[in-house]
Image (cartoon, coloured by chain):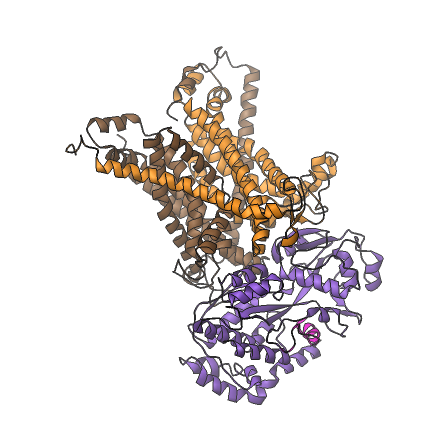
Amino acid sequence: MTRNRIKVRPGDRIFKNLSVGAGVIVVALIGLIGLFLLVQAIPALRANNVNFLTSRIWETSDPTHLQFGILDLLLVTISTSLLALIIAMPISLGIALFLTQYAPRQLARPFSYVIDLLAAVPSIIFGLWGILVLAPRLSGVAEWLNRNLGFIPIFANGNVYPNFSGTIFTAGVVLAVMLFPIITSLSREVFERTPTPQVEGALALGATRWEVIRTTVLPFGKAGYIGASMLGLGRALGETIALAIILFIPRGKNFDYSLFDGGATFASKIAANYSEFNNPTSAGAYIASGLVLFVLTFAVNFAARSIIGDKKGA
Amino acid sequence: MLRQLEDMTVKIMRPIGAVGIVASAALVLAACGSQPGSTNSSTPTSGAATAATGTANVVCGGKTPLSGEGSTAQKTAMDVFAQQYTKACPGQVVNYNATGSGAGVKQFNAKQVDFGGSDSALSGADVDAANARCGGNPAWNLPLVVGPVAIAYKLDGVSSLTLNGEVAAKIFNGQIKTWNDPALTAINPGVNLPSKPIQVFSRSDDSGTTDNFQHYLAASSKGAWTQGTGKAFKGGTGNGAQGSNGVATGIRAADGAIGYVESSYVTNGLTAAKLDSGSGGVELSPANVGKALDAAVFAHPGSNDLAMDLDKIYAANTPGAYPLLLATYEIVCSKGYDADTAKAVKAFLTVSATTAQQPIADKGFVPLPQSLQDKVLTAINAIS
Amino acid sequence: MTSTLSDTEQPALSPAFQQVSVGRKVKNGTATVLVWLSFLLAVVPLVWVLYTVIVNGIKVIPYSNWWTQDFGSVLSDEVGGGVLHAIIGTLEQGLVCAIISVPLGLMVAIYLVEYGRGGGFSKVTTFMVDILSGVPSIVAALFIYALWITTFGLPRSGFAVSLALVLLMIPVVVRSAEEMLRIVPDDLREASYALGVPKWKTITKVVLPTALSGIITGIMMALARVMGETAPLLVLVGYSAYVNWNLFNHEQAALPLLMNNERATNTMDPGTVGFDRIWGAALTLVIIIALINLIATGVSRMVAPKKK
């Protein structure tokens, strides 16, 4: 082993080249995907007869007269994801705290396992559960909210009224359930790493359990928790099949800022219509919307990364 | 109704008596060799219908698995076809991927599958693309599966509802908004229709079922349907849901909902409306659909491309006929397959058009009438 | 996560805690109740999902035909048959995806942690991995379709699905491996260098074994995730009701594809064949994923560095 210490070891060179090569492949891959998306999207964007960013029309069946705008897709995508996040963030925080700070070890271990397992349950299962099992029960809650709080715009009659099952509300709740395991397992990992001296110090000063959490665990894990939530948001934005199954598409009506609206997200729109992709120009319209989703998800992931990364570097 | 069903059966069975025995004997000779007795003697009708053309040529062999893709509406029938094909030609299988008519045409044109399944005949740019895929030879639309489409509804307390083309069109384009609209009560005397709002459901994904349904509305509504046709729903009212299951689930969840689905989805609380083409409400049943099919007219008379002009059926006023039907075509190359594929395609289609037609009747489809079956077999034999 | 000194250096709270006042007790109690409540609130739907899958799926699972037959010989409304064809497809596609993405992802992580260490190209690579992890599965599928099928003219196949899954799996592998490699203490590396061990051997013999248990867990979780993906299957492979071992040709089923296929073409009312099949397949998939997780836990325990 010490024989070729002085020379540049061939093993080292090969190994380094391999690892750099792997990096180059990944970088090239992304370049290719970006290029492909652009190349496919540009002809459609050129042929578009309405404003791509501000129009709410999506009419791509006639390739010679394309009309497509992403505004509605964007609004529905953001509102389902935000609703999911608003529900999932506090609850996931609760589960993560429960599993790391409150639950006895014998309980925490199996539950952590079940929650990790749920993170891997395919979204098609959540979708089916959402529309077949949850929606019929949830629509009662939705109707109650609508009846009593309907004066608030987000609880007003939606564009799929009088239907309350295939709504952004249902979709958001199902998405939130899908996010619980993701946000929880990442936050749990961070909370578990709260330095023991801090916790012990707080306890030594006579802090109650909540005070220990508030003064040590939360400040330490905040960045990780927010980062985990952003990663969850990224997942929610790109969720495809579950939303395609759940959401109803209102005919002739646009998104109107109510939770009881229906609609399509970027991903569910692409998935539901990919069979239409026999014309390259029409397909380009969907790919252009895929590009927007790509940018949106990237921005969220990038933000998550920098929040977590800052913490790491500190 | 039973009477009509008997008529239908007689029509389909007719050739069996004539040349059935000869045909099955021919089949034994021509078929794949291995265990011919087990496949044919047990099903003496297998070659019967073929006999109408005078030849029984299920020549087994060639490519396996054969692949097809397309319409979800004919999936159940395709399962039967595949089963019968394997029965007639042991060792030969068919993969049918039910992803939708649009995908079927696309994958056929992209040479990813050997035949496409589509609820509407090739049209526009797809014709050229299909011809190019077949090496410059025309692609044919062969109707092999005919099934009814139901206008299904859920309305508590109303177990029987009659619609006509005009009223249906006005419901599906939003002009009629409540169940007790005068137009509805007028054609449903004696039915106590509530004042509930009508919730319309349609397919949110592109679908041949939607296309056929809109063609029906356009042809039968006396001008009330001005929204046009196509695989995307154009009515501009109600909600879209994913797939026939999505539509059925949507209707089931709401009292006062209505939508269109293939008849096999009319279960568990859903009811199919009767259709009145001018001679009274007609119930959805294979026999009644069979009656309507007699009015079929071909888009290219004299050609082996058997694309049908269903608008004539939709607009017809045949007493006792249920006009809202859907014909699913298998899209195949007339020429341009390699020898192996051509052999398998012909064998599969022959079985599908003959032996397999009776079994699909049990699944709610309508067996091909004699005249249509003859034309289909002629076309299949002409594939090379 | 090793460098959290700035946090530990700060005092927990400037004024020391006094005796437990009523207000603090109330706050503590409220927090406890809220934490318990949110846990219960989350457990309800999660257990509900699992319960739905198990109760609806259990009907078909116990029969041997479910595990040893395919749907080739049964009609869509006929009881019987099994999902062997879909299990084979899911495992094959997942395995091939792992064979490609694990070495690639691992090497990228090694580059980032051991060689790149904050350099220009490593920043670019991290950035690109971030982008890759943001690629929605349907977009990855469309990309592979354009590359593999439109450009190369190859048929749709299970392998095309594997390629799309690779795109989804690489970033997860890179991220988890990177995380695990980073928490290997530098002391270990330095001790190894001091003994004259070449860097590549230090990495393969010291760093990797130390991090291996965490890396394996990460890989298995990633694998479980991609095996449940539906979108690439819709675009890149045809469904077949027959067993097909050939990853490169002909149609091949997979469990999510089978579920989607049943959903699109069969009725789903309770008691129907379609209903039994779809939930049976869901339960089968969950069982497979649970098994993979169990194996991951077992293997990672086995290879974990021995503690004194």
Residue positioned 41% across, 31% down in the render = C123
In the image, which lettered chain appears brown?
C
Whether residue C45 is visible, yes or no, is: no
Q: Position of residue C211 (x, y in %)?
A: 32, 35
Q: Is residue C174 above or below residue B171?
A: above
Q: Position of residue B302 (x, y in %)?
A: 63, 78
Q: Nearer the viewer, residue C231 or C48?
A: C231
Q: Quadrant of the N terminus of chain B?
A: bottom right
Whether residue A17 is visible, yes or no, is: yes
The picture's colour for chain A is orange
Q: Position of residue C34 (x, y in %)?
A: 56, 28
Judge left or right: residue C103 versus residue B354: left
Residue A268, magenta (yes or no): no
Residue positioned 60% across, 64% down in the render = B73
Q: Position of residue C204 (x, y in %)?
A: 26, 37
Q: Nearer the viewer, residue C238 or C243?
A: C238
Q: Is residue B230 above or below residue C175?
A: below
> To which quarter of the image does residue B140 belong?
bottom right
In the image, which lettered chain appears purple?
B
Residue positioned 60% across, 73% down in the render = B305
Give, as a single range, the part of the protein colored magenta.
B285-302
Residue B296, magenta (yes or no): yes
Q: Nearer the viewer, residue A7 or B38?
A: A7
User: Residue at the left extreme?
Assistant: A3
Judge left or right: residue A311 versus residue C185: right
